[in-house]
Amino acid sequence: MRVSILCLLVILVAASAAGEARAEDWDRVKWPKRTKALYLGGGATYLGNEGLGGPSVTAEYALGCCRWQLLGDAGLTWYIPDGDGGGGGLGARAGVAGRWLARSFRADSSARIEMFMNAGTGIEHLAVGDGHVTRPDLWVGWGVQVRLLEKKRMMRITFRVAVAPSLDDDMVDRLACRGTCTSVPSTSPLDDSFQTMLGWAW
Amino acid sequence: MVTLVLASLIVIAHDEPPPPPPPAVLVAVEPAPPREPSWSWLGLRFGLANTAVLGHDRTMATFGLQTHRVVTGALRAFGEYELAVVMAGSGADGEGDWDVYGRGHIVRAGLRHPLLDTTIDKGEGPIRLYADLEVAAGAALLSDNLLGTNVLPIATGGLRLGYEIYKRDGGEPSTSAIDGHMVFRAQATRDDVSFVFGAGFEWGTR
């Protein structure tokens, strides 16, 4: 619950944070000094071989230097319950990451089309099914954005894949299935997840 | 005797000096033109694929990251990673509700060569249109809630259709480019041959 409140606060602070990026930062192969971003997305988290999925909202605040950004992000995911009510609930996540501006192509005087790669770590609190758990994660991702030079906005599609320590079978049953899961038990020490997000940065 | 010596000295004095050594032959060698740095390409792709795992059909949506470079002439080598979202129905041939789900990781490396290409340049920078033939080999690590984890060797062959736009900054040669493409591939595993489609972008720099 505390993690959820913290994430909500970070989202609100990031969305309202002051600081305009300087105009000259926008038409170069580099990140603006400060940007904020808001994403809507969706994805799936695996608990063993059981999947949880649903829509998410994420906010980030980033500091840029050259082709690198250091960012903090926080998000909430609503996991949609399956037919028997298992797996439904809320996930709250906060973390830090680094982002590299891998490529930039200046299409014309109004826009650049860019590719970036990023990686980060964070902590997620899952309150789903009949239990809750908090666990760390590591993720890598990549994406494409259109940088609108006159409007000083970036429209971004990003994708990330994450790994987190796996849970024991009893916990998976409580969280994902509200009983006994029917899937083949996973033997992997890591659970993975993925997320696709569409966002605006300014 | 004195006459003989004097005669010899006169002969020696009239000997022609040895010919000078031939002048060194200087050949003007044109300096080699500076070799243009090769293009390095990096990009991403979204795809759809169908494959069989242990005789069960699986549909995959993939999110890929790929790179390629010119090997020699028009031959290019590429490497790809794809994260796959695996979906299927629990019926024998994958039909029914989408109650089978999982994920996978696919890597492949291959070569491509143009079958057809043409370049258009209206002053702002060349645009190359191409149709490339490509072959590749790799492996897929697929995991789902019904079959667990399986490793599949894969081989693919197909067509890549696309364009490359090279941006010219003033009179300077291009240093940045963008590629948009679609791939249509046949993918062979131990169990079957299936179809793969993908669409993506790559950015070039040098």
Image: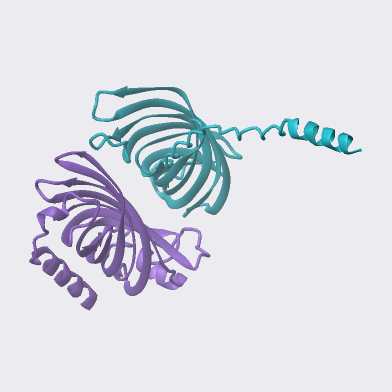
Q: Furthest residue to the right?
A: B1
Task: Place residue B9 in its image quadrant.
Answer: top right
Q: Relative to A162, is A10 above or below?
A: below
At which x and y percent is residue B150? 56, 52
Residue at horizontal 53 percent and vertical 65 percent from the top: A187
Residue at horizontal 34 percent and vertical 36 percent from the top: B179
Q: Quadrant of the N terminus of chain B?
A: top right
Q: Is residue B183 left or right of residue A130?
A: right
Towards the viewer: A201 or A92: A201
At which x and y percent is residue A89? 26, 65
Q: Quadrant of the C terminus of chain B?
A: top left
Q: Furthest residue to the bottom?
A: A2
Q: Relative to B94, is B19 above or below?
A: above
At which x and y percent is residue B158? 49, 29
- Display colour for chain A: purple
Instruction: Give me the chain that's cyan.
Output: B
Residue at horizontal 51 percent and vertical 31 percent from the top: B73
Residue at horizontal 14 percent and vertical 50 percent from the top: A153
Q: Is residue A69 left or right of residue B100?
A: left
Q: Furthest residue to the front?
A: B2
Task: Place residue B38 in its image quadrant.
Answer: top left
Q: Is residue A124 left or right of residue A6?
A: right
User: Could one spot residue B138 in this view of the protein?
Assistant: yes
At which x and y percent is residue A161? 37, 57
User: Could one spot residue B187 in this view of the protein?
Assistant: no
